[in-house]
Image (cartoon, rainbow, N blue to C red):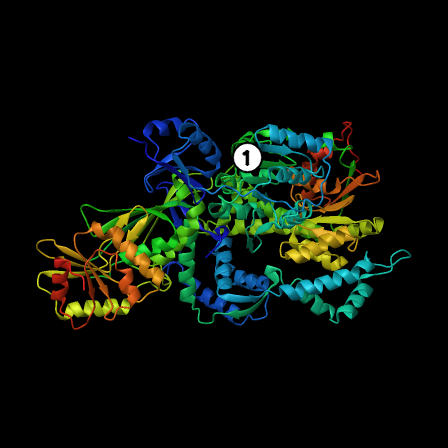
Amino acid sequence: MSPTRIAVDFHEGTLRITGLSSAEAQELSTLVPFVEDHRDACLRSDAMHASRLKHWLTQVRPRSFEWRIESAPVLHMSGQRRRFALREDQERAVTAFESGGCRGLIQMPTGTGKTVVAIDLIRRFATSTLVVVPVRDLMYQWHDRIVDQLGVDAGLIGDGVHRVSPVSVTTYDSAAIHMPRLGDRFDMLVFDEVHHLTGPWRRDAARMSLASVRLGLSATLPTDSNRLATLHELVGPTLYEQSINQAAGHTLADYHVRRIAVKLAPEEQRRYDELSRQVQRFVADRRDHEPHYQWEETFHLAGSHDVDPEVAQQADAALRASRMKRSLEEHAAAKVRVLEDLFRLHAGEPMIVFTGSNVMARKLSLRFLVPCLLSHCAKKERREYLNGFAAGRFPVLIANRVLDEGVDLPQVKTAIVMGGMSSSRQAIQRLGRVLRRTQDDRKAVLYEIVAEGTKEVMRSRDRRRNDAYRKRQDGKRVSEGR
Amino acid sequence: MLRSEHALKRLDFDRNEVHPDRLLRQTHGHYRRAAVSCIARYAHGRGSTREDLHHEVEAILRRLGDCPPRRIAAFCKLLDDASEFETASGRAASLRRRVFEFAAELHPVVSQVDGLFQHDIESARQKVMDHVGMTWGEIEQQFFADVIELQRLSDFDTALTAEQLLARYNVAQTQAALYRATRVELHVHVVSGQPSPLKHVVRAIKLSGLMHRITQFKQDPASYHVVLDGPAAVLRGSTRYGVRFAKLLAMLLASKGWRLRARIQLPKGQPMTLHVSDGDGLRGESLPAAEMDSEWERDFAACWDKAPVEGWHLHRESQIFVEGQQVFTPDFELRHARDQKSIHIELVGFWTPEYLSKKAATLERFGDKAPRWLIFLPKSPTPEQRSAMNGVNLPILTFDKRQAPSRWIAAALRGEVT
């Protein structure tokens, strides 16, 4: 009797396998994780295991399986307009990826040309490719790079656009949402800033795709072993690593960090102290009831009116006081004066100002009449500002989060951080903006304007604990002028 | 629908149950008045920014003394959903562009001029005003008018009542709790003397795009157990189908005869359960236009009622047939009281050729699931209807109001095709 015909198809981000005998299923289970699915009378597995499954079927049933998945088209990158020579470190990264099984992670600091490495690999593989990026600006930037360097008009998925092409660019969230429908369209995935892939929801962006070639790029791979293991499972092993210290001075500009502390105005300080006391009173009061009370619990308490309305109201008030303190720190009038001084000092140089909130970004934009990049800006407007800034038509760009990671900014040697979060990753990425290598040998400067006598100073210190802030390549501390 | 950051629920760790926030007449009667005020603020708020409207709603609800921040945010979202805002995207962006391009030459705009920098705030603003032909107040108002919180209200559904807003809130919070559901189980039952929920439920399931396992209770053939999730759910608990569950709930609320149990996965992974039923007093909105010819169905039932055949009873949408992920609920069933003979009846109305061929395929697929069938075409069937049913090997009659129902039974029992 001839064996049952085995069939495999793609079903909303999963593989449906039918027709395997029990012995075959047993054998397969040692290679590919799957479960029996009685709903569809099939075995079901994550789409990401497709190439391993196909390889196994080709060996055990070379002529009797039906692969109901269309092969990815071969791309004709007619343009390849800008052939570029890779630097030695970039060549090493490309070779490591190809010899490492075409699935894995490459870590290179911001400004060392990760995108160049990825574009070169897309060109080499010449197959349908989906590039996944953290933010919309990066999506447009990748689109431009692909048009420019591969001669392919890439599709866009996200920001209200849904144009799927053999080479497309999308965001992590859109990829996770749409992968059940897109997962069979691409044979290569490029995850830019791949550390974003580890969130439970976003993992579907990798799991639900059939892609056999998987590249993850990052300036800073997670140090947490569980998150790194997740990336290894979803994308592949770490194949190439270059630390910021290896790059600084060679491919990156050297840099200074200058912290400028400003005083709150007397009225601001009075209000700040009053709010601090309110928060302290609340926490002290809670600790009278629960000695181990942590501030983080306040968020939960504020929502529990049904348990204890009075405490919920106090918690809510404490949270508002805390937010108000942050706002006072960020909006301190003296900061705007310092910013003006820095604009004077660096007049004629392109500068980027990072703010901790959209409100502050808009406020500064209107005060100094310079463009700000916020999430509401449409594609065309953002590109105009970025291009105008690159061409020197705009002296300054103000940004909140949108420029945090990876968005290419041309030749910036001076940046200013006003407020912001304390995470070291964000600090590195922000620092990366000023680390661009320029023609001259001047060191880049990162100014950080903090309000004295506030939590900002502590957050700033936290940021500096990161290697990128603390050490130069020669191991000496970078200057911390005030 | 709310966003997940608006979800407010109480967790009962003793019973491992999730209780979505619910405003009840007895305990939250004071919210009615606040809802009236919030609606009035929106109704008279044309031209106000979203941010200002939200601040005012916040102030109204805070005064109640028992309104947590998430509840406030949820009310703002529901009021926004009943509103239209001017997006002003082109206008604001164009103004910004003009200002930034013009002002680039003035950089840096300083607070006091000196020998090096000649453009102070006042003179720079004056130059900008001259350039764009607007006052500074107008510029400030329009500069970021496309930012979501600064968009201005242009229209509001003034028919919205406080009761409706509160009812929407309760439904929306239950839906929001379902965003974190990994699987839903439904118990659907036909209550004698009440409209059958089966067809409605089946339709809701189909529209939700979820996968299902449907089983009929052996002890109670009028009840079904339905398990719903998505393709990847067998691989791992995934909340990615949560929004589909939430949409399903909204559709279920339009019918009676069901109760739902959802498995909820909290962010830290603890499994919890959410119970909802048609008796919870949640008010739903109706399904999208139904794919059934209700007028014809009414005529059909009236025809039977006029001359019922002794020993036989007409039941509407009494049974669900399942094959894999395909589900079918025939329009009617004629059941004999004594010998348990039954005839399943489907009315094939005037529909598109695609619908007709799909219907024919369904009848072919499910034809052997029941011993006796009767398919009705309209009185004067189109050639398309006739040809679509050509391959269907089941008794077919054309419907005529004057026809005696006894003739239907006879035709079905004989396997007649007219």
Q: Which image quadrant: the C terminus of chain B?
A: bottom left
- x then y, percent, for residue B73: 51, 56
- x then y, percent, for residue B375: 22, 61
Chain letter, disc 1 residue: A
Q: Which residue appears at 71% of the width and 69% of the height?
A: B137
Location of residue A64 with respect to B58 vertically, above or below: above
Q: Amino acid at mark 1?
A: Val
Q: Which image quadrant: the N terminus of chain B?
A: bottom left
Q: Is residue A39 left or right of residue A432?
A: left
- Asked if one can make out residue B149 in the rendered structure from this viewpoint, the answer is yes
Q: In which image quadrant can residue A41 be found?
A: top left
- x then y, percent, for residue A2: 31, 31
Q: In which image quadrant can residue B332 be found?
A: bottom left
Few, some or many C-alpha atoms within 10 Å of disc 1 (few <14, some 14-19, many ≥20)? Answer: many
**Relative depth, front residue between A101 and B206:** A101
The residue at which mark 1 appears reads as A235
**Relative depth, front residue between A467 and B334:** B334
**Relative depth, front residue between B112 and A128:** A128
Q: Secondary structure at mark 1?
A: loop
- x then y, percent, for residue B325: 32, 47
Q: Which residue appears at 73% of the width and 29% of the height?
A: A246
Q: Residue at the far right: name it.
A: B115
How many numbered markers are drawn?
1
**Relative depth, front residue between A274 and B45:** B45
- Asked if one can make out residue A32 in the rendered structure from this viewpoint, the answer is no
Q: Which residue appears at 64% of the width and 65% of the height?
A: B90
